[in-house]
Amino acid sequence: MFQPVGGMDHIVRALAREAERVGATIVPGAEVTDIGIAPGGSRVGVTYVKDGETFRVDARHCVSSIPIPVLRHLSRSNFSDAFERALESVEFEKTCKVGWQANRRFWEGDLEGGKDAGEGIYGGISWIGHNITQLWYPSNDYFTDKGTLTGAYNYGEDARSLGDLAPHERLALAREGAARLHPEFADTTLVPQDKGISIAWHKVPYQLGGWADWHPDWEDHRQAYKQLLQPEGGDAFHVTGDQISPLPGWQEGAVMSAHYVVHQILGSMPLTVSEEVVVPDSVALTQGLR
């Protein structure tokens, strides 16, 4: 897997830089409160709040990457009944992560070495029958002094129960689970508590989950997926993002969705979808299960 230098958010920064270079205006910290399609379609208005002030933008097209659980709680007008049913049909998966910084990369090293030789692990994942579900090891900066690794990545009921804990309780549980795989985790001088961090995506206000939890064998999901691939108000309002792509939960899916919507706006892709659509299997694509 390719990894951008400095982290995945550098992809977003690069896109923002290029958008501004061609004249786009980016307004960070803006909370959308209302989306209204003009009667008869063809235009759309968006109301947002920034620094306590309310603004409204009217445009020919609105391409919305707002997560579905967030979008359905916004004020909307002149959207079709089928679109409203689609928003109610799709939930986002609960998911949590824990990150640790270790003062020594104890998972690496020479298996034939001494007591601090490490375990010969260079990247990859360990799975465990514990709430944390899995550990991810860094595939960068090998043989350096310190290292960061993912100390939990779970979903479903495990994520719900972990997310309900206070942050310090999440770290305690994650440390206990990780120590079953690597006893070094019991040493807080080696893996400091203040270098641990956790996130529960389903509790992040403008995300409310990790990814769209599509089920290909559910009839309401087949109808919803098809509906969300089609714009509202003629071609005024489009939903985009990995949430409505063949690869939910992956940045590649978000890019695929963006390409699809751009081609719809340009007229090189039909606005309507054929009767048969292939709904992605989110569990298989994000968790490798089924």
Image: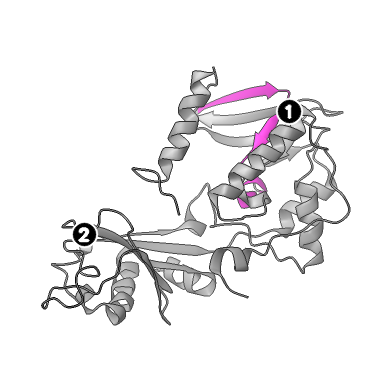
Magenta-colored span: 53-72
Vertical position of residue 64 compared to residue 286: above or below: above
Q: CA distance from mark 2 to mark 1?
A: 47 Å
Q: In the rendering, which numbered label is found on residue 80?
A: none
Picture coordinates of residue 189, whole percent (x, y): 13, 67
Residues under numbered marks 2 and 1 in contact, where contact means CB atoms less than 8 Å apart: no
* In the image, residue 56 above or below residue 195: above
Q: Is residue 283 left or right of residue 238?
A: left
- Can you tell which mark lies on residue 194? 2
Q: Earlier in the sequence, mark 2 or mark 1?
A: 1
| Residue 65 found in image quarter | top right
Please state the horizontal and vertical placement of residue 86, each as a whole percent of the image. 76, 53
Which of the numbered marks, if any, corresponds to residue 44?
1
Whether residue 141 sits left or right of residue 219 in the image: it is left
Instruction: Give residue 280's position: percent from left, percent from top.
Output: 69, 60
Mark 1: amino acid: Val
In front: 150, or 54? 150
Q: Residue at x 73, y 23 (%)?
A: 60
The residue at 30%/82% (across/down) is 180
The disc labelled 2 sits on which kind of residue? Answer: Asp
At x 30%, y 79%, the residue is 181
